[in-house]
Image (spheres, grey):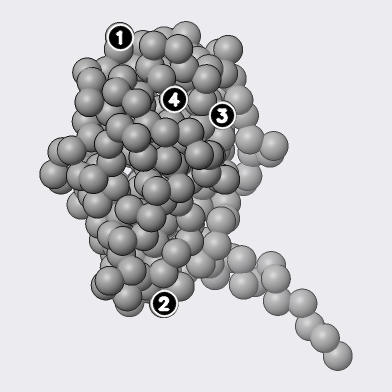
C-alpha cells in the first residue's frame, strides 16, 4: 500500500538540518552573494531588467551554480510605481535616479541561498527610500535578535513592530522557513499577517529567510532587505557574507 510521508518529510525539512546540509547551504549562499555582487557592479542606465537578470546568472554559472530565482524590479525614485521585485522581467530601461529591488537565489546541487538587497542607479537615495530602507534594516535586526532556540512565532511577529511604527506596511512574508523547500515558520507583519500563525517553537539548526519587504501603504514604493540565516545554540547566524546597506550601482562588494 501507498504510505503518505508528506508530514514526516516536511517535519524533517523544517527541523532536522544536519551540519553537512548547512555547509552545502553556505555554498548556495555564496553563489547567491556572487550573483548580487555582479549585478551591482555592472548595472547601469540603459539596461533592461532582462539584461540585469543575465548579469545575475553570470555571477554564479561560471562556478557551477544553478538558477532558482532572480526577481528584479526597477522604478524611478522620484515617481515610483514598483514596490516589489517582478517575477517576470520587463523591458523597461534603467535611468539615472532609479532604484532596483532584487530577490536572488542560486543553488549548488539543490542547496540554495537567498539574498535580498536594494540599490540606486547613479544617484543618492531620496528621503523616502532612506526611510523605507532604515525601517527594513531595523526590522531585520529586531527579528534576528529574537531568533534563538525556544523563541515562538509570537516573538518574531512582535519584532516586526517598527514597520507600522514608521507608517509603512509589507507586501510578502517577513520570515519563512527555507532549505529544501519553502516551509514554516511563515509570518508576516502586524498590518499584513500571514494566512495562519503556525504553532512552532524555534530549534537549533532550523534555517529561514528573514526578508523585511517594507513598502508604502499606497503600494508605490518599497525596498528589499534580508537573507538566509540559521538558528544557533544562542541566537542566529547569517549564512551569507554580503554586507547590508542601501547600495549604489557600480559599487564593488
| Cα distance in 3D space between marks 2 and 1 | 42 Å
Q: Earlier in the sequence, mark 2 or mark 4?
A: 4
| Cα distance in 3D space between marks 2 and 3 | 30 Å
Query: Mark 2 — residue?
Result: 109
Residue 150 in view of the camera:
no
Q: Earlier in the sequence, mark 2 or mark 3?
A: 2
Marks 3 & 4, CB-CB < 8 Å contact = no
Q: Of tags 1 and 4, which is closer to the observer?
A: 4
Report the side of 58 relative to 151 (left or right): left
Residue 97 in view of the camera:
yes
Residue 229 percent across, percent down from the top left: 34, 51
| Residue 77 to residue 252: above or below | above
Q: Nearer the viewer, residue 24 or 59?
A: 59
Quadrant of residue 118 within the rendered picture? top left
Query: Mark 4 — residue?
Result: 75
| Cα distance in 3D space between marks 2 and 4 | 34 Å
Marks 1 & 4, CB-CB < 8 Å contact = no
Query: Mark 3 — residue?
Result: 171
| Residue 56 to residue 145: above or below | below
Name the quarter where the N terminus is drawn. bottom right
Name the quarter where the C terminus is drawn. top left
Marks 2 & 4, CB-CB < 8 Å contact = no
Task: Sort mark 1 into few (<14), some (14-19) or many (20+) by Cα contacts within 10 Å.
Answer: few
Residue 107 percent across, percent down from the top left: 40, 67
Query: Mark 1 — residue?
Result: 127
Residue projecting furthest to the bottom:
1
Q: Residue placed at 34% from the left, 35% from the top?
A: 46
Label 3: state its secondary structure.
loop
Marks 2 & 1, CB-CB < 8 Å contact = no
Amino acid at each position: 500500500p501507498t504510505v503518505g510521508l508528506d508530514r514526516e518529510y516536511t517535519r524533517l525539512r523544517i527541523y532536522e538540518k544536519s551540519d553537512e546540509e548547512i555547509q552545502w547551504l553556505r555554498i548556495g549562499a555564496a553563489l547567491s552573494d556572487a550573483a548580487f555582487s555582479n549585478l551591482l557592479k555592472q548595472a547601469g542606465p540603459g539596461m533592461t531588467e532582462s539584461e540585469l537578470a543575465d548579469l545575475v546568472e553570470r555571477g554564479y554559472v561560471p562556478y557551477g551554480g544553478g538558477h532558482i530565482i532572480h526577481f528584479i524590479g526597477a522604478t524611478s525614485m522620484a515617481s515610483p510605481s514598483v514596490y516589489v521585485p517582478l517575477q517576470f522581467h520587463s523591458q523597461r530601461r534603467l535611468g539615472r535616479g532609479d532604484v532596483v529591488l532584487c530577490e536572488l537565489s542560486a543553488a549548488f546541487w539543490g542547496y540554495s541561498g537567498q539574498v535580498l538587497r536594494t540599490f540606486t542607479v547613479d544617484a543618492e537615495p531620496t528621503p523616502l527610500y532612506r526611510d523605507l530602507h532604515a525601517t527594513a534594516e531595523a526590522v531585520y535586526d529586531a527579528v534576528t535578535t529574537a531568533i534563538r532556540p525556544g523563541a515562538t512565532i509570537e516573538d518574531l511577529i512582535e519584532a516586526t513592530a517598527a514597520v507600522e511604527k514608521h507608517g509603512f506596511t509589507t507586501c510578502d512574508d517577513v520570515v519563512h522557513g527555507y532549505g529544501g523547500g519553502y516551509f514554516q515558520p511563515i509570518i508576516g507583519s502586524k498590518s499584513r499577517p500571514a494566512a495562519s500563525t503556525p504553532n512552532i517553537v524555534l530549534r537549533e539548526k532550523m534555517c529561514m529567510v528573514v526578508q523585511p519587504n517594507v513598502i508604502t501603504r499606497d503600494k508605490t514604493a518599497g525596498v528589499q532587505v534580508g537573507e538566509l540565516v540559521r538558528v544557533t545554540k544562542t541566537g542566529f547566524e547569517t549564512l551569507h557574507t554580503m554586507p547590508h546597506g542601501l547600495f549604489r550601482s557600480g559599487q564593488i562588494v
